[in-house]
Amino acid sequence: MTTLLGVEADPYVLPMPVPDSPGILPCWISLGNKHPNARYQDDIWPMGPLIDIPGSKIHCLYWKNCPGDLRDELKLVTWTMLNGELRPTYVQSRGRATRTRDSAPVMRHSFLEWLRLARWLNERNVTRLGGCTAEHWRAYATGRTFSGCSRDHARRILGQLSDLWAFDQLSARPSGIGRPPWDVEGVDDYLPEEASTGGGENQTEPLDETVIGPLLTWAIFMVEDLADDILAAWAERRRLTARAQATKGTPASRASLEDYLLPLGARDDNLVPATVGDCGGVTLARTFIAATTGASFKQVDRFAIKHGLTRLAAQRPGPCPLEVPITGRIEGRPWKEYIEFDEAPVLMRCLAAAATIVILYLTGMRPQEVQGLRSGCCPNPEPNPDGTTSRHLIYSHHYKNVTDKDGNHVSAGEEREVPWVAIEPVVHAIRVLERIVPVGELLLSSAHQDFASRRPFRGSLRAESLARRVEDFVAWANREADRHDLPQRVIPSDPLGAIGLARFRRTLAWHIARRPGGLVALAVQYGHMRAVLDARTSTGYGDRGRPGIHGVLDIETVRAAADTAANLLGRTAAGEKISGQAARRALTGALKAPRFEGTLTTRQAATKAAKFLAHDGNVLFDNPDSFLICAFKQDTALCDPEPGATAPNQFACQLGCGNAVRTDAHAHALRDRADYLDRQADYTPKPVGDRLRSNANRLRGIADTHDAIAKTAKEVLT
């Protein structure tokens, strides 16, 4: 056992815990953390005291899964990991990704790997960690790392096993487990071959265009047009519920109950107010009836039994309409006749999901960052001296890769030095959530977003819960589209699976880079986003010490440019001609454009993408809405790009710009569009038809000009 003198001499070695020692020492628990702690002797150690990220799932370490012979030794080294710090000399030898203290999720993964090793050793009759020889290390590591995992995952596994040895050296009673051989020999022989692609945020697939278009349309519609109705209905439901719970029965309330219910049972065609019970069956809406009549629950129950109203409610279920005005409109008609008592909490869940979708998609925040937003995070800006108003800013925390001055993970994150810039739909979404929670509370507070039971949860809604609410919102939107006969607004299933939360950030970058003028881009709003992002209101917009949304956008833009370059080379190689003042520059840029096989996922990808985009004049941007390719050069662009922009304002593309390039395929598309406009003109009033025909003639003129001046790629380059 380590002596007190030894502990004082080596500050990295922890004293021996006793059975009543805290599972997590107080020095590692933040002041606002209220999660329960364990004792060293307990069989379950919750990780909550180390977790301050809103909405994080709280995992536990279960010692029942550890072989009995190895439990005491593994328990001590795990406690040392949870409460200690690796030596700086060890960390420096392991590379920049290693920290003296990791986050709670990383520690849990290390524990699970150590537990797997303990069971493996137990199966081979090794009853002490000190009995794990170099041969055991090699056999176990080879079996784990060559069992189908990626090279990066295998490297993480080896690092976790090395940490077992390192933390054992820091425990008060080291087990004597030997140092893994790869720490001395190198890890290459223990790693599988490098795969062509890897994981990471950049591999997340964007949502399909057919999905995100109607999804975002419904989300904004609910936030901006239906929120007042839903919030009013929710307030009325809460008022009625409180009234029913506080009411005591009187002779007058019994008389009111009889006047309300007796006529309902008198005729077979009268409907009885009904609700769906906890077990799923239809039953009498006792809370609604009690609140409506002023009767007590006991009076309602006795009356229902006497007159068989529960049976009648199941046979003839009727509505429980809330007396709130309906102001929202769909296609000029009220979206509902009324909102029902039991419908209000369902709609509140959908409203919160809609606001979350708007914030996630139109800011580019990570899900954790949205979960950490609080009421008051987006104050109204002060008017400028010239009478104009500045953009709304969102002040928030970020959590990914946040460390303290010693390199230790900080679970609570830190406030962003540069706030997010919010466009109007995002501001509306935040304002709606602020009407649900108290001032200063998390916008997605679990307690205040639990509309059914109002349970005293802590923190923010978890990602799994939010993802389910998004799916419930999609189901609601599709029911509304069907009810209002709007097939064009149905949200289809995404071909790549569940919508989730993480895909919105990537989808934002995809559509800014590839579809800036389409329905999904919401033209003006996305124009603002592109302007904000390209202007880099500071070098860290969407960032603090990491690429942030810039990295995702830059990578997606480079992908789009690479696809555009490849398509241009393919078309011209197939014999298509090319026109435009920038034709030579476009072909030269296409030959220099990067090629991608698989997915761009390396840590240096965002930096390389930003450098490539800085090659002014050589990056190609496809603009299908304007039937051209833009060989963007800032000095000659007519779309009024922001200072320092690395991409055009494609939604503001101007005829006659010197950056425009067209191929024969573009000319063909121009004529197809002109024919479509002519067909439309035949079925519209004359003034509108004349404008359509004029636009069609203009498009044919552009195509004719291309045909007259277009050259082959060989002619352009020589």
Image (cartoon, rainbow, N blue to C red):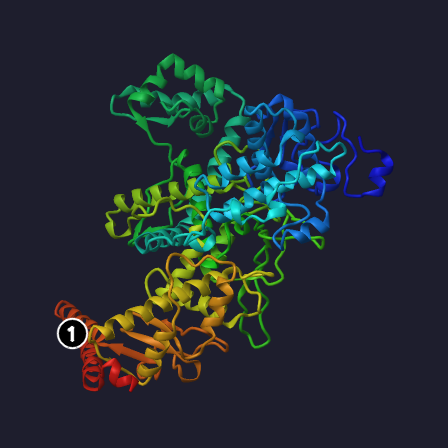
- Rendering coords of residue 311 (x, y %): 33, 17
Task: Specify whether residue 458 is in view.
Answer: no
Mark 1: give few (<14), some (14-19) or many (20+) Cα within 10 Å: few
- Rendering coords of residue 16 (x, y %): 78, 31
Q: Residue furthest top?
A: 306
From the viewer's side, name the closer residue of 600 and 638.
600
Residue visible at 24% across and 76% down in the picture: 663
Residue type pointed to by label 1: Lys
Quickly name the residue at label 1: 686
- Rendering coords of residue 511 (x, y %): 38, 62
Residue 709 is left or right of residue 451, and the answer is left
Residue visible at 59% across and 37% down in the picture: 108
Q: Name the quadrant of the N terminus.
A: top right
Residue visible at 53% across and 33% down in the picture: 454
Residue 366 is left or right of residue 51, and the answer is left
From the viewer's side, name the closer residue of 432 and 398.
398
From the viewer's side, name the closer residue of 39 and 52.
39
Residue 382 image-quadrant placement = bottom right
